[in-house]
Image: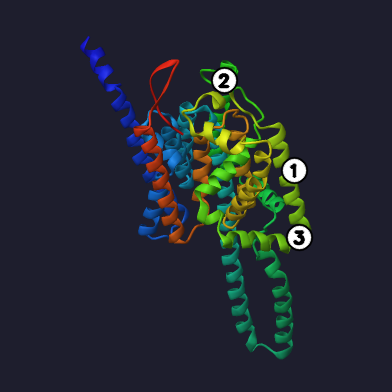
Amino acid sequence: MQAVSSFSDSCSTSILRLTNGVLAVICSVLIYEIIIHLRPSLDDKKATLRAVVLSLYPLHWFFTFLYYTDVASLTAVLAMYLLILKKKYLFSSLIGALSVVIRQTNIIWVFFVACSGIIEFTQSRRKDRAEVDGVSSSREKEDLSANLKDVSKISNLRKRRVNNGAKSHNKITPQSSVPMTYTSGLLDEIHNIIIISWNHFWELFVSFSPFFMVFVAFVAFIRWNGSIVLGAKDAHTVSPHFAQLFYYGVVSALFMVPVHFSLDQAALLFRQFCKKKLLSLFQWLMALALGFLSVEFFSIAHPYLLADNRHYTFYLWRKVINYNRSTKYLMIPLYVYSWFSIVGNLAKNQKKLWVLVYFLACAASLVPAPLIELRYYTIPFYFLILHTDIPDSKSWFFMGFLHISINCFTMYMFLFRPFYWKHEAGAQRFIW
């Protein structure tokens, strides 16, 4: 009886909520470690500032005080990513398996992290080859110059023959020793990764086979469970909700206002448009057409969204997105602009293939979800902002102020503005 009582006390509401508080601290440390790993030249003060601002991200910070799986899910995914950045593939895959246990849709981010690891693996092997080729080329040049000095004492005829041989050798040697150049095209990146992966097949297979085992185990789970969903399967059926991807783009861009909605960014996108007018015009028209099709035919109003007025998405849907017939169409250019700005900023520092894999991961995690839940945007947002180069400290201070302001508002609404339903006893509170 005493054991049951102690177990009940250890699973009290306060203790359970405290676990998320502890995980939030661990998550902040992981964010800091990822920042200094991705940007080793960054000093401690700037890295700490960025980690604090990211830890205050409203969709993450709010749920650190509630017993939701979001904080644990984000912590596990970031830990998995940090470990793969440090090339600890086995431990990364084990944490990835834990993240899938916490939330099944994290299998998509396990796949994304594995792909990121493979891209980094092939890139490092390519750099190693370039360094080796560079060293061998310099040695050949040194040996050649030494030979030329030795033969300078020989007769003019022999010296002329040697010099001619040296010139022909100089014409041939660089072609065989210069490493493969870095190309900017997406197809070139895919081709290079395939070639390098094939040349290091067994090393790559051994390193990433633990991730393959996680995927196999997940397929077995799907076969056994009959669905990816645990619990209310009818309420979370897979649906083609393509508009969700556009909602994510604009929400993430708004949380990074100084980056995506500044005059400099708008001018940059305009210059890029003018540089390749026909191609850019085609891309924008295609994006606008896809946005229209998504909003018109693949925008889902889930019953939970329409009925539960505790969530902010209830009001966003009624007062903004679906305010009238034309509103949802008028927002399409904003959706498209947000995604063009996101992709453009990521492409400044990341491989085009990495950006493509990130977009596909976002689509795979968001499109099948019929319910508009801003919590679903947390993990893709962190990958986005961690890989977006924001050197200006003013932008980080502004984002920090924005996050704190939103957090104060949401906590005030949650604590001091309860309301009541006629059909259900107890106070109801506003949450994300």
Neighbourhood count class around disc 2 (C-alpha, 10 Å): few under 14, some 14–19, many 20 upward: few
Query: Taking 147 as reference, is 174 above or below it?
Result: above
Q: Which residue is mark 1?
A: 289
Q: Which residue is mark 2?
A: 235
Q: Is residue 385 visible?
A: yes
Query: Taking 45 as reference, is 254 above or below it?
Result: above
- Inter-mark Cα distance, 3 to 2: 45 Å
Neighbourhood count class around disc 1 (C-alpha, 10 Å): few under 14, some 14–19, many 20 upward: some
Q: Where is the N terminus found, in terms of image quarters?
A: top left
Precedes in sequence: disc 1 or disc 2: 2
**246 relative position to 311: left or right:** right
Precedes in sequence: disc 3 or disc 2: 2
Q: Which residue is mark 3?
A: 277
**327 relative position to 375: left or right:** right
Return the residue nearer the eye: 388 or 115. 388
Precedes in sequence: disc 1 or disc 3: 3
Q: Residue at x 52, y 20 (%)?
A: 230
Query: Taking 244 as reference, is 253 above or below it?
Result: below
Image position, residue 271 (x, y; %) = 67, 63
- Inter-mark Cα distance, 1 to 2: 30 Å
Three-letter amino acid code at the position of disc 3? Lys
